[in-house]
Image: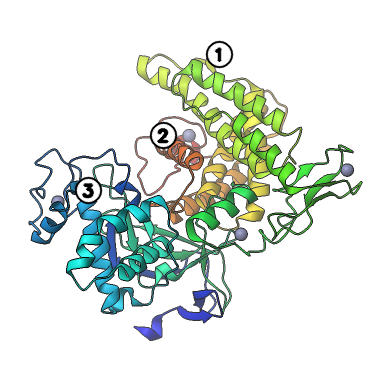
Amino acid sequence: MKSTRVFAIQERSGAGRALISTKTLASQELVLGEKPAFISPHLSLFTSSPYKNICPSCYGIHNEDPRSVCANCTDDERLQQFFDLGLTPLQASICQAVVTLAELRKRRSKKVDTLMTRDVQDDELSIKICQALVPICAQSNIKMVHIRDALGVLATNGVKVQRSSQFLPCVALYSNFSMANHSCLSNCNYMYDPDTFEIELRTKTVVPKNRELTITYLHPMMTTQERREATQTKWGFTCMCNRCCDATELGTFAGSIWCQLCGVGVMSALSPRCPDSTWCCGSCRFEMPSSAVNQLLKALAEGNISEQTNDVGDLKDTIFKLEETLWRSSQFLHWNHAMILNLEYRLMHHLAALDKIPQRTQTQTNSAPNVDAKLPRPFWERRLQIGLHLLEVVGQVDRGKTKWRGMVLQDVVISTMELAKRDVQNGSISKEVFKAKVNKSIQYTHEAVICLNNERMSVPSLFNERMSFIKLENEEVHNTEEEQCFLCGKQNKTGSDDVPLQQCASCQKI
Ligand SMILES: [Zn+2]
Ligand SMILES: [Zn+2]
Ligand SMILES: [Zn+2]
Ligand SMILES: [Zn+2]
């Protein structure tokens, strides 16, 4: 087995272990595939859980006697000791998982022995779990130091996984995969099988030999401050990737603001690695303390709208509010700022949803397509403008075949084709120009299929609240798209799950 491995595990001084490529890897190449070494219900469920009746063996959610396992599982008498402590079934299964991991680590089981740990912060959750396990530590050879080690291993290496909404959100450990470190400029993606939690790590770009193989724990449209806070509080490290160490974020200015004095210059942190760095205008050299910049960003973030909407009235209202927020934010933030990109990404999904509405009513009432019901040209131009902006800027800070890229490419193709069809019909572009646009769209579509397939089963492990909202929207838009021809938008029932974008028979002739 070892000779076919395309990665090695290397110790880095003071920075833990890392996965390193042992040969040049092509884009989308499989780096590793492995089964989980250990699974536990997500620890946060210990203190706040909406679930009452769960199977403590398979972690399924059911309505049977809360103290027994489900029909598919066999009873585990070891759980009784945790029930005796007065814990709920969910708390008992979390405690059992933590103790099991502590035992595995204590006897240096190969599966979990290589995983790194860090000192657990004494947060409320860890304290509560440790307190619950005091009686267990008193009567067994598992001591509090082992419990803390297990909690540290889970916090450092855990990957959030979930079978379906019928099962608890869980955290899984992998012997090799868990050693993949974070970089905001990662070169790999991962996905897991929702039934077995078997995980696959694949490259998303070409990776030369002897490079560290990295994944991103965070969404690329998070701001520098959000990324720094997340890596610090959740995993206890400061990201030192090229994006985080460059005040211009690779020339995109995704963290910069307009100068508050001259109004035309761009202000960035003087030393981006330092959270307390002074900010300075590139034109007039006006300086601002980081606290003032953070205050400004916080105020803007709080003004952002976050409601989820479904019906037409709300949707139009939300689009209006998003445009308003974008306009207000762009008075202060560089037009490539991550907060702007994030708002644009949300706007893009809302515009796509608006486009779905007239088509939905058409299929429901079975009436002839109503040309007047089509959305006006500025709608399509705005959608295309946003899509191209996201491709250009986010493509700089998160390269390769990613899910967001697949989503945006899909949107760009739909808007490009809608505009091109109108233009060729009214004679403002020639047949040749139209054909060139079709060819470009087909090229984009092939890339979108690769992007979406490459990240089909999962998304970066721990999103913040805001991003998980977007994730849900993604899935909706993606699913409705699957049944439609990407060129003409007609319903196309032959679309299979494996090919998110398909042309209908009439469009294939173009
Ligand atoms: Zn079960
Ligand atoms: Zn970074
Ligand atoms: Zn200035
Ligand atoms: Zn078609």
Alpha-carbon span between mark 2 and mark 1: 23 Å
Label 2 belongs to which residue? 480
Q: Nearer the viewer, residue 182 or 449?
A: 182
How many labels, in total?
3
**Of circles 2 and 1, which is in front?**
2
Give, as a three-letter code, the residue at label 2: Thr
Residue 503 is left or right of residue 411, and the answer is left
**Colour theme:** rainbow
Q: Position of residue 263 (x, y in %)?
A: 86, 37
> Left or right: 44 with respect to 107?
right
* Classed neighbour count for the residue bearing mark 3: other residues with Cα under 10 Å, few (<14), some (14–19), many (≥20): many
The residue type indicated by label 3 comes to: Leu
Above or below, comparing residue 86 to residue 332 in the picture: below
Residue at image point 37% right, 49% down: 498
Residue located farthest toward the right when viewing the structure as drawn? 284
| Callout 3: SS | helix
Expressed as whole percent of the image width and height from the top left, the position of residue 294 reads 68, 43
Q: CA distance from mark 2 to mark 3?
A: 36 Å
Q: Quadrant of residue 323?
A: top right
- Name the N-terminal-most of marks 2 and 3: 3
Task: Give the quadrant of residue 510.
Answer: top right
Mark 3 or mark 1: whose residue is earlier in sequence: 3
| Kind of residue indicated by mark 1 | Asp
| Residue for point 32% across, 52% down | 128
What residue did someone put label 3 on?
Answer: 90
Q: In this orientation, does residue 436 appear?
A: no
Cβ–Cβ under 8 Å for marks 2 and 1: no
- Secondary structure of residue under mark 2: helix
**Relative depth, front residue between 102 and 457:** 102
Disc number at residue 286? none
Along the polypeptide, which appears first: circle 2 or circle 1? 1
Residue receiving disc 1: 372
